[in-house]
Structures are given as C-alpha cells and as structure tokens.
Image (cartoon, grey):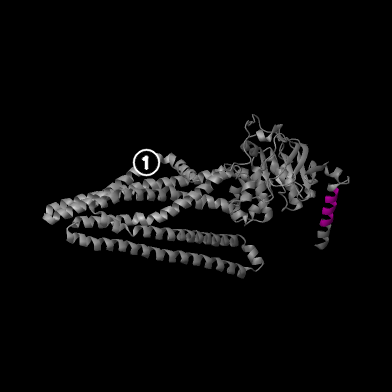
Amino acid sequence: MAAMRLDLIGRYLRPHRRTVIFGAIALVVVNVLSVTIPMEVRRVIDELQEGFAYDSVLSQAAWIVLLATTMGAVRLLSRQLVFGVGRQVEVNLRQRLFDHMLRQEPAWVQSTGSGDVINRATSDVENIRRLLGFAILSLTNTLLAYSLTLPAMLTIDPWLTLAAIAPYPVMLTVVRLFGGRMMKQQRRQQEDLSGLSDLIQEDLSGIGAIKIYGQEASEQQAFSQRNSSYRNSAIGLARTRSTLFPLLEGLTAISLLLLLALGSGRLIDGNLTTGGLIALVIYVQQLVFPTALLGFTLNTFQTGQVSLERVEELLRRQPAILDGNDPITAEQPRRGRLEARGLRIRYEGSERDTLNGLDFCIEPGELVAVVGAVGCGKTTLARAFGRMVPVPDGQLFLDGVDINRLPLKDLRGDVAMVPQEGFLFTSTLADNLRYGEPNAGDDRVERAAERARLSDDVKGFPEGFSTIVGERGITLSGGQRQRTALGRALLVSAPVLVLDDALASVDNNTAAAILDSIRSQEGRTIVMISHQLSAAAACDRILVMDNGRIVQQGHHNDLITTAGIYRRLWERQQAAEQLEEMAS
C-alpha cells in the first residue's frame, strides 16, 4: 500500500519534475548557506579575540549579510517553486475531477451522494495540495537540515551537540501527539462549519415552508445547537494550540540552557572557543523549526496519502454510459423515428426488469403519449431515449441506428428531454431558456417562451427575461418552472422531444395550448409521458404501460371503448374531476 502511495505521489509530480528539481536544488543551496553562515560567524568572532580592526569587522559583517540575504532570496524561490507545484496540481486535479463527474451517469451521482463527492473534490484535493507542497518541502528541508547541520555541529564539539539535541526527540513526540489531535479537532471544526452552512442554506431555500408551518422556533433551536457545537470545536482547537506552542518553546529553552550551561564549562576549560559556542547556539536554533514542523509534516503526509487514495478511487470509477466502440455520425439531419425491439432495462440491484420486452415504433412527426400507473416504467423509458440509463445493444433505435452506436453528444443533441422536475439555475430567465443553445438570440428566446405559454408570465415580471429566477427557480411557481424547462427544450432544434410528465403542474387548457403549439413545429417527434389523460387524448397514439410492458396502444377513442387499463384510468380520472367540480 505504501509503495502504491509513493507511486501515486510520483505520478502526480512527474508532469512538474523540472520545477521540482529546481526547487530541490534551491533547498540544497539554502541549507548549504545555513551551515556556512554560522561557520563564518565562528571564524569572525574567534579572529576578534586576537585583535580588533574596524574595517575588517565591517567587511566581515557585509559578507555575512550578503550570505544571509542570498539564503533568504533562495529560500523564497524554493518555497514558490515547491508550493507552486502543489497549487498547480490542485488546480489540475480539481478540473479532472469536475470533468470526470460530468461524464458519470445521473444515477451514480444520485446514489453516491453529492456531499461525499464534493468533500473529495474540495477537502481531499486540499490535503493532496498540502502533501505535494508543504509536506514534501518540509520533509526535504528537514532531511537536508539534519544531514548538513549535524556534521557541522559535531566537528565543533560532539558532546555539546548530543546534549543540545537531546530534548529534540521529546519535542518530536509532543508534536506528533498534539498534531494528530489538532488535525482531528480541525476536521471536526470544518464539519461543524459545513453543517452550520448547510442549515443556513436549507432554511433560506425553505423559508416559505418555515413560515407556513410556524417552525421559526424549531429552526432557531437547531441553529443554536449547531452554532454551539461549532463554538466548542473551535475552542477545543484553540486550547490544544495554546498548550502545544508553549511546550515547544519550553523544550527549545531547555535545549538552549543545556548548551549554555555545558558550553560555559567547556569555555573555561579551553576546550571550546567563543565563536564555536555561538555557532552551536545558531545551529541549535536553526534545527528547532524543522524538528517541530516534522510532526505536523508526518501527519499531513499521512492525511494526504489517504486523500490521494480517496480521489483516485473516484477517478477510477468508469461511467456506465459511454460512446460505443464504433460510433456512427449522421451525415444528414435525423428524422426522429424511434423504435424499440424487445427493450429490457433492469437497474443494478433490482430483482426484476423495469422495462420488460417493449416493442413499438414511433414515426417521425408523430405525437405519442405514454400512460400508466405509478411505477410502471414510464420515466425509465423516457430516460432510455437519451441514454440517461444503460440501454442494451440492439434494442432501441433512432432512424434505424442503434442508439448505443450514436455518440452521446449527437444523441442528446437529437433528443431533447424535459423532466418533471425541471432544474433551473440561479441566473436570469433568459439564460435558463437558452441553456441548451447559449448563443441563441433574444428573438429565439422569446419564441420559445411563447410556445411554452410563458410569455404572459414574463410580462408580469419586473425585469422581464432578465429576472433572476433564484436558486432552483425558487422565485417561480411550479407551473412556471415546468414551462421554463419546456421552453429550454423547445429552443433547441432537436428532432425528438420527450416530455416526462412535464405538464403536470399546468392546467388542462394551458397544456392543450402548449401541445398545439408544439405540434405546429412540423417534423418533430414528440413522446409525452403523462398522468393527464385529457392531454393524452389529444395525441395521435397512446401507449399504455403496466409492470414494464406495453399492454395497450391506439387512439384515445378506440381505447376508451375497449375494456382494459386505459379505460379504468380514464373513468377514475373523470370521476375525480367531477368530485373536484362538486367540491368547488
């Protein structure tokens, strides 16, 4: 597992190997200079014991300042190079994840849960950035610091060196213990903050329901609990930090006191020069930061490797719906002929087929309704037309071509689908209408709105088509949202239009007017999934489904005179409408 993780780290760094190499060279130069400067200080101080020359002191001081300035500039360069690699990997990886998620089928996103996917694309990617930037820089710097500084210290006085670094293992242990605790507390604080943000977002989206049911007090209590939880986690993290850093300062002070106490005796005995003692003090101070940081670095390294595996697991997930091995590109515009030959679809984990051997043919320009009881497979059929669900080879055809052989981009350009819950983006009404055709002009947007019977509503909006519809179209009514989604589909020039109960929130008169408007577009094949049998009655043909099968088909007038499911559904709906009229 560890080898695999190192291989992953190498794979992520490989595209930036030139920058990494330059950054490593810069780190080597920094650490060589950090060893050279104390040696120069030692030499100058020891020379001053023999005699004092003002000009000599100035020249020596200028030389040391030059070395220190160079070290600072090279250190800045090394951090920019190595941290820059981490940032670039973060940007590229986040783009890869987003592109990869867009290729997945809708069912996977819905079953996986957006929260987990978002967490991997944000928090885990940030952990990888810290791993490839901060952790690698810190580990390399610590390794170089010890490998170069310790030999230099040992050449001055081995026993004083060992005494001075004796508290360092304790310092590392303390950092490891407190570092792991701090990471857990920080993660909890982030989770509490996310929960607080989610509650605010949810309450703002559902403010209408809160007001209707008078649940302000309940929501205030829920917010207070989450707010208190966030406060407690933040205070816990602050307490850990306020304990750790004084401990580190104390251990550093102990190391320095040991060096000064033992070093003064060595000075008296003549076994150590003043310059040597000062050089050792500088070296000890230089090792404090890499040692203290090493504990945090190891924790970051471990966390980053876990995040690497989580992100790779997401990237390894292949979409269930892909372009076929031998795609066919249409040389002429599609006519819109749909045909099913024994169409069977079964969802993963299900014990039975949702669609169980469907056979039908819908001719170009035909308006066909698909009706049936809830759960009979109507929506699955609608999704199959656009390959929103996996479709077996050789069972569903568009203009005589297996839809699995059509590139997904071409197929979904030929089949415009309007779901029952038409999703609207937080943008203007016009932008939502032209979402399928971003470059469509205002005249096309207005014509699409008119066909969807949305124009009269738009006239009542203060800013017309420039009205911001709000998150998920919250500022619009259910019928307006559906008609906006319908207008979006009508704006694109797809030869096939699939309406998945897209008129459910529209009254019968408006639904009839919309259908007449759609039918006026000659040549467009329309498949309408509907529970409104009054709308289905105006269609050229009706397919009646039951338990994943087509059990009846024909014109409305023929079906209501034949005993069967359709007539029972029609009689039931007529009775319900009569009861509503009597009640009103």
Image side of residue 560 versus residue 141, left or right: right
Using the rendered view, name the quadrant where residue 358 is placed.
Answer: top right
| Residue 282 visible in the shown view | no
Q: Is residue 455 left or right of residue 90?
A: right
| Residue in view at x 85 percent, y 50 percent | 568
Residue 275: which quarter of the image?
bottom left
Comparing 32 with 345, the one in front is 32
Q: Position of residue 296 (x, y in %)?
A: 41, 56
Which residue position is annotated with label 1?
Answer: 21
Q: Is residue 528 visible in this depiction of the protein?
A: yes
Residue sticking out furthest to the bottom: 217
Q: Name the amino acid, label 1.
A: Ile
Tell me the magenta residue range: 567-576
| x and y percentages locating residue 559 in the rendered image | 85, 44
Which quadrant would the C terminus be assigned to in this image? bottom right
Residue 272, by quadrant, is bottom left
Give the vertical position of 229 relative to 354 (above or below).
below
Vertical position of residue 20 compared to residue 165: above or below = above
User: Residue 194: x and y, percent?
Assistant: 53, 59
Observer-nearest of 82 and 24: 24
Query: Magenta-highlighted stretch: main secondary structure?
Result: helix
